[in-house]
Image: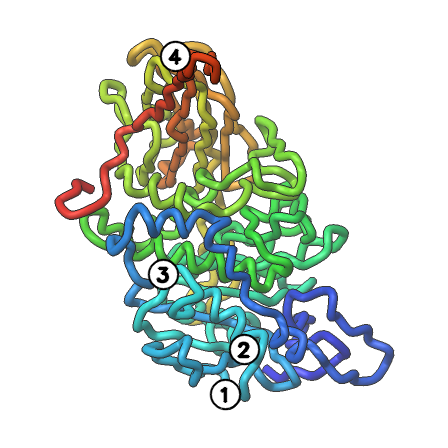
Amino acid sequence: MESFLIGSLYAVGSFPIQRNLRSSIRLVWRGHPLAYVGAALCMATPLRADWKDEIGFTRLQLLAGSELPNAPLQGFTQVEALEISANYVPDTASPGFAGKTFTVKSGASGVSGHASLVASYFYGNTTSLSSGNIPVDLYSASHWLGGGFLKSGFSTAPAIETHAVQNHSWIAQTSSSAAETNQRLDFAIDRDGFVCVVGENNGNTTVLPELLGQGYHTISVGLVNGSHSAGFTTLDTTGRIKPDIVAPESYTSFATPMVSSAAGLLRSKLAAAPYSLSGADLPRVIKALLLASARKDTLAGSWVNTSVRPLDLRFGAGELNINHAYHDLRAGRCTASGSNMQKSRGWSAESVNGNSTKSYFFSIPTGTSPTPFCAAMTWHRIVTDTIQGNNWGNLNTSMADLDLHLYHASGFTQGTLISESVGSVDNVELVYQPALSPGDYVMEVENTSATATTFALAWHSLPSVGIVASNPSARELDLQQGTFTITRSVRRTPKFGPGAKL
């Protein structure tokens, strides 16, 4: 498909694609081609050295050390809008990308400053969370949308994705076929089992992009400062909430690969023994882990959800925290049971029959302080093609309606309802309690549809910390010492280190 310059946008067939997600440098179309200055500005933007601290990775490194996996051996896919009319490829000769095997999928390209910075956060050897010697496919957005991968506008199914994570730090605001394009991507994610992370637009008054950012199976990313497009979807079932999660950057172009890199780390761990997840369980569980573990206390504004609106209208599930997500993963896979207590953090990948429920009982230890608790559930809609024969593209979608409830419990007896997430339009449900007191509880997954549905559920709680003054008085006169005791509850998360059980 041919593309042509129209000011600061590229038109790809009927897709007007913004060059990148840096809205502060968007040029205004005035009837003639304009020079583009994005590359110079991107090149001048330094990597944020403190972002790993903010999302918990520095602490995770101290705790886990050499246990942390490298990027998944299957590798990554990076998709970029064209810069300076033709460039979409990072600086593949940079020492920061040593060991990567690059495949340029969309034709010849010079170096893109935007792509180089995205790549640094995504898979840079010292600047990402997912380093290692891996293959990386590089696409221009127009080619990826068309004949290169998604096959939009073609009567064939999307190509097979063999890589673990796709990153999309570009947007397309609208398209006459945006719904079908998103459905094609959802189909590919479910079929091939890759994680797809996409950026929303910059600016807190911009509208949600229709392409990719309003998909069901992608992970859409905004900013901790709230300066991004957000709110209810307007396409392919209205009223769903985007973004899913936020990260600590000034532009969504670079917040997006932060989430992609975190997803790569989780994917490496989940695909290996003893978990050995495969297929569509991988993107479902990774999304549930990231959403359940996201922080609510670091955002530029207050975080609010309701029983029918699982995510905050601006901040989604909250801020990315890989330390929390990794600990929740490592707490282990759980199976629903009416007779076994689960840990107070963990995850599950199961199927729930139509018009039935599954229960997960857990407890907050007696004698500890109330602690924040969050559980997130996600599942996939089904996308099928109804055309007979070799043609492909007349798509039909269906999606189960799952609900998530949190109850008090007494042992294994369900008690009164505390909180629930029962929205009927989204494929995400989330319950959050800022201070869950010690006691017994049960999470219930309810399928109100007639068809059995596979889902991922992850839940997160923090160890409680208490400070008690045994002797609150300290005096200089007679040298009486004041004493206090700090206690930290242990939630049965396995220890790191040699011989630790996973």
Q: CA distance from mark 3 to mark 2?
A: 21 Å
**Which is in the foreground here, disc 4 or disc 3?**
4
Residue 23 is drawn in which quadrant? bottom right
The mark nearer the N terminus, 1 or 4, is: 1
**Which is in the foreground here, disc 1 or disc 4?**
4
Q: Is residue 293 above or below residue 482?
A: below
Q: For the residue marked with disc 2, what is the amino acid?
A: Ser
Q: Could you tell me if residue 446 is visible in this image?
A: yes
**Which is in the foreground here, disc 3 or disc 2?**
2
Which residue, given by chain and number where applicable, does mark 1 sit on?
107
Q: For the residue marked with disc 4, what is the amino acid?
A: Ser
Circles 2, 1 touching at the beta carbon (< 8 Å) = yes
Q: CA distance from mark 1 to mark 4?
A: 71 Å
The mark nearer the N terminus, 4 or 3, is: 3
Res 192 label? 3
Which residue, given by chain and number where applicable, does mark 2 sit on?
140
Q: CA distance from mark 2 to mark 4?
A: 64 Å
